[in-house]
Image (cartoon, rainbow, N blue to C red):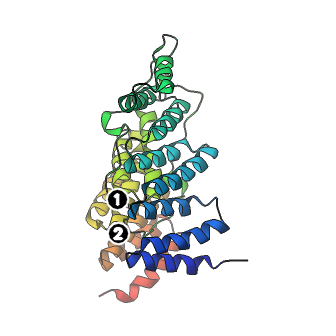
């Protein structure tokens, strides 16, 4: 029998706003019964369990999301979920093991080593961690880079329940990191260690942003922006995160910073200014928003979204 997904989601949201997470859980379970592979539903269910103090159930829900990402070979997204599990239970050893395995798949043996060391601090007799460390430290293993301490397996700060407002099409190719040749290692010319680390931070930032952990996503995008090749994409995503947090001044600041990057194409500038226009609109600066959306059309006269924004905002001009 078909279910009314929108109606159930609306009911669940009303329960959440009333401070009744357990009733909201029942609504999400109805949806998961119809679509057990929906990662967002499992993630929201985990958040609700966590808010209700049911940590074991929260962890099981998050593990389901991590497994689904792992099956799709979306390693960085799976890592972000396992880190979220550690925010619920910092001594959940299995999460450290899985993160270590995923780091090894990505060639980040230094970070895998950190995970194994964390495990041994919790359980000095963990044989799998001892074996993993031995393999990494063996002379046959090439030495790998280690991410800066601030980017290693720290736990995400910030609320699990920020506003759910979505503002822009983040699936645009303009917001994807530059493609890299997978056959090239970080020691080869053309790709620096910094570039590869920045790409990883960018992907982690996207994963945290999708989970609406904006504060931790911001940290990752700031780290990603260290590489020149990643500055534009990272600054745009920083602007998006602050916009969704409701910090419009910081959002506008990052969009303006990104506009000063030399060599941007008209297409990228159009997307940038469209996002800037959304930030102006969100904070009630109608005139600035209109001017910015008009600039978008000057850069790309086929930008239908900007034209629609102008149509809606024009009557509000004072």
Task: Estimate the x, y position of residue 228 in percent, counting from the top left.
Answer: 38, 40
Earlier-in-chain disc, 1 versus 2: 1
Q: Residue at 51%, 18% (x, y): give it.
A: 135
In the image as oriented, which residue stretches furthest toward the right?
Answer: 1
Task: Using the image as rendered, state which of residue 51 and residue 207 is in the foreground.
Answer: 51
SS category of the residue bearing label 2: helix
**Vertical relation: 187 (above or below) 92:** above
Disc 1/disc 2 C-alpha distance (Å): 9 Å
**Vertical relation: 127 (above or below) 60:** above
Q: Residue at 47%, 41% (x, y): give it.
A: 95
Q: In which quarter of the image is residue 41?
A: bottom right
**Mark 2 and mark 1 in contact (Cβ < 8 Å)?**
yes
- On the question of residue 20 being in view, the answer is yes
Where is mark 2, residue-wise?
Answer: 279
Left or right: residue 267 versus residue 246 is: right
Task: Estimate the x, y position of residue 47 in percent, counting from the top left.
Answer: 44, 61
Task: Estimate the x, y position of residue 14 in percent, counting from the top left.
Answer: 44, 80
Q: Mark 1: few, some, or many residues within 10 Å (few <14, many ≥20)? A: many
Where is mark 1, residue-wise?
Answer: 255
Q: Mark 2: few, some, or many residues within 10 Å (few <14, many ≥20)? A: many
SS category of the residue bearing label 1: helix
Task: Estimate the x, y position of residue 147 in percent, counting from the top left.
Answer: 38, 32
Q: Residue at 35%, 46% (x, y): give it.
A: 155
**Vertical relation: 313 (above or below) 46:** below
* Quarter containing the C terminus: bottom left
Left or right: residue 257 versus residue 302 is: left
Residue 45: which disc?
none
Left or right: residue 97 versus residue 279 is: right
């Amino acid at each position: 029998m078909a279910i009314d997904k929108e109606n159930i989601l609306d009911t669940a949201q009303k329960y959440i706003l009333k401070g009744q997470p357990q009733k909201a859980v029942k609504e999400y379970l109805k949806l998961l019964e119809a679509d057990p592979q929906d990662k967002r539903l499992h993630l929201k269910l985990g958040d609700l369990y966590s808010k209700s103090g049911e940590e074991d159930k929260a962890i099981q829900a998050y593990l389901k999301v991590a497994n689904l990402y792992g099956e799709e070979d979306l390693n960085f997204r799976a890592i972000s979920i396992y880190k979220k599990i550690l925010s619920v239970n910092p001594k959940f050893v299995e999460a450290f093991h899985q993160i270590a395995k995923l780091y090894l798949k990505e060639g980040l043996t230094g970070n895998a080593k950190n995970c194994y060391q964390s495990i041994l601090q919790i359980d000095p007799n963990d044989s799998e961690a001892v074996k993993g460390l031995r393999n990494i430290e063996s002379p046959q293993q090439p030495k790998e880079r280690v991410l800066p301490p601030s980017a290693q397996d720290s736990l995400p700060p910030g609320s699990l329940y920020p506003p759910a407002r979505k503002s822009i099409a983040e699936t645009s190719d303009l917001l994807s990191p530059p493609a890299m040749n997978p056959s090239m290692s970080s020691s080869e010319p053309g790709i620096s260690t910094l570039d590869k680390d920045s790409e990883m931070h960018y992907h982690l930032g996207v994963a945290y942003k999708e989970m609406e952990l904006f504060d931790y996503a911001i940290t990752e995008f700031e780290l990603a922006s260290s590489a020149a090749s990643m500055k534009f994409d990272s600054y745009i995503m920083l602007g998006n995160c602050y916009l969704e947090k409701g910090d419009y001044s910081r959002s506008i600041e990052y969009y303006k910073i990104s506009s000063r990057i030399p060599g941007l194409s008209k297409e990228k500038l159009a997307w940038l200014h469209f996002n800037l226009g959304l930030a102006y609109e969100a904070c009630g600066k109608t005139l600035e928003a209109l001017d910015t959306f008009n600039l978008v059309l000057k850069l790309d006269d086929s930008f239908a979204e900007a034209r629609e924004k102008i149509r809606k905002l024009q009557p509000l001009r004072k």
